[in-house]
Structure formats: structure tokens, C-alpha cells
Image (cartoon, rainbow, N blue to C red):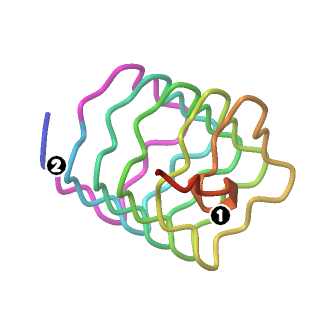
Amino acid sequence: MRQMLFAQGNLSGSNLKGIDAANSLFSETDFRRASLVKANLYFADFERANLDDVDLSGANLRGADFRNASMKRANFTGVVMEANFRGADLSGANLFGSLIPSLCPQRNKP
């Protein structure tokens, strides 16, 4: 299911566990309470989407765009947070076990 175009859709409560949605467009889509566990969301666009209470544990978010998205209480357990979260609302989000590269110090290699 790569490169899906689903802007302004309603996927609330959907079980999308393991979906391959790389390079897909989901701007302004409603994902409230959906499961995106271990989903491949590589470079997917979620700008202004509603992802409140979404389970993203183990998902591939590399390069994804979550600008101005609502992600209240989202579960990011075990996720590498290499995405654009500018303006996103992460109130109450579970970041346990996630890696945020921009907050990790760079090691100088000899």
C-alpha cells in the first residue's frame, strides 16, 4: 500500500498494524485511537492530521511530516523520532524507550 493518497479522510479507530504507507499523503486525516504499531511511515505526510491516542509503537517515522498535527497521548514506545514535529501537540505523549536524535549528543570520531 505504498504511496497512498488519503488526505482529509477518516481512519479513526482503524487497525493499521504493520501497514506499509511509505511516501503517503495523510494531511488533515483523522486517525484518533488508530493502531499504527510497527507501520512503515517513511516520509509520509501527516500535516495537520489528528493522531490523538494513536499507537505508533515500533513504527518507522524516518522523514515523516507531522507539522501542526494533534498527537495528544500518542504512544511512541521504541520509536526513533527522526521526523518533523514542528508545531505538533504532543501533550501527554508516551515517549518511553524512544530515541530523539536531535537531543542526543554527537560523538566526535577520531
Q: Main secondary structure of the magenta part?
A: loop
Expressed as whole percent of the image width and height from the top left, the position of residue 38 reads 44, 23
The earlier-in-sequence mark between 2 and 1 is 2
Residue 6 lies within the magenta run: yes
Q: Between residue 109 and residue 4, name the one nearer to us.
A: 109
Report the amino acid beneath label 2: Met
The boundaries of the magenta stretch are: 4-20
Q: Pointer 1: residues within 10 angstroms few (<14), some, or many (20+)?
A: many
Dots 2, 1 in contact, CB < 8 A: no
Expressed as whole percent of the image width and height from the top left, the position of residue 102 reads 61, 62
Q: Between residue 99 and residue 75, name the one nearer to us.
A: 99
Report the amino acid beneath label 1: Ser
Disc number at residue 70? Answer: 1
Q: Between residue 14 and residue 40, name the one nearer to us.
A: 40
Quickly name the residue at label 2: 4
- The vertical placement of 21 against 8, above or below, is above
Q: Quadrant of residue 71?
A: bottom right
